[in-house]
């Protein structure tokens, strides 16, 4: 598969505001595969891959997230292709 794969963390008011569910919905809308989950330190972790334009679009969306969230920092880095087959919300 030729595509892009990214992993990272989102910091701010991102837990308890539907961030994971909205991220998953946006990723599915863009045709991406991967996962999103809450982290113990209050951040949200993400891993996603697919068409490079779609990966860039989700990365841009994550800068603000859903309306009820307040993103203060987004850290993303490219990673080797993971081979995800769908997009899931992890617990």
Image (tube, rainbow, N blue to C red):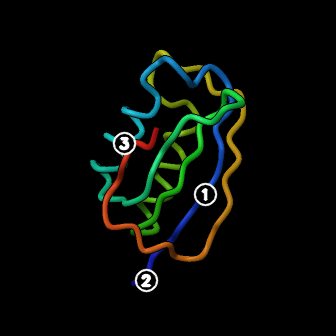
Say which mark, if any, is on residue 2: 2
Q: Nearer the viewer, residue 40 or 66?
A: 40
Q: Residue at x 66, y 53 (%)?
A: 76
Query: Which numbered disc flags the more N-terminal residue, 1 or 3?
Result: 1
Report how far apart the C-alphas of labels 1 and 2 lie in the structure: 17 Å
Query: Which numbered disc flags the more N-terminal residue, 2 or 3?
Result: 2
Residue 21 place in picture, x, y as percent: 37, 33
Q: Nearer the viewer, residue 53 or 62?
A: 62
Q: Nearer the viewer, residue 42 or 22?
A: 42
76 lies left or right of 83: right
Q: Which residue is mark 3?
A: 24
Crowding at dot 1, Cα within 10 Å, few <14 / some 14-19 / many 20+, comes out as some
Q: Residue at x 38, y 32 (%)?
A: 22
Q: Are discs 2 and 3 less than 8 Å apart at CB?
A: no
Query: Which numbered disc flags the more N-terminal residue, 1 or 2?
Result: 2
Q: Which residue is mark 1?
A: 7
Residue 91 place in picture, x, y as percent: 46, 38
22 in relation to 35, above or below: above
Q: Residue at x 59, y 76 (%)?
A: 80
- The quadrant holding residue 54 is bottom left
20 lies left or right of 71: left
Q: Secondary structure at mark 3?
A: helix
Report how far apart the C-alphas of labels 2 and 3 lie in the structure: 22 Å
2 lies left or right of 39: left
Say which mark, if any, is on residue 30: none
Q: Secondary structure at mark 1?
A: strand
What is the residue that sits farthest to the bottom in this orientation? 1
């Amino acid at each position: 598969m030729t595509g892009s794969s990214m992993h990272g963390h989102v910091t701010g008011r991102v837990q308890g505001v539907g961030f994971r569910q909205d991220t998953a919905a946006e990723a599915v809308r863009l045709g991406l595969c991967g996962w999103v989950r809450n982290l113990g330190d209050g951040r949200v972790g993400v891993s996603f891959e697919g068409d490079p334009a779609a990966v860039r679009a989700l990365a841009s969306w994550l800068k603000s997230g859903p309306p009820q969230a307040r993103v203060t920092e987004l850290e993303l880095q490219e990673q080797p292709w993971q081979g995800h087959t769908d997009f899931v919300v992890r617990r």
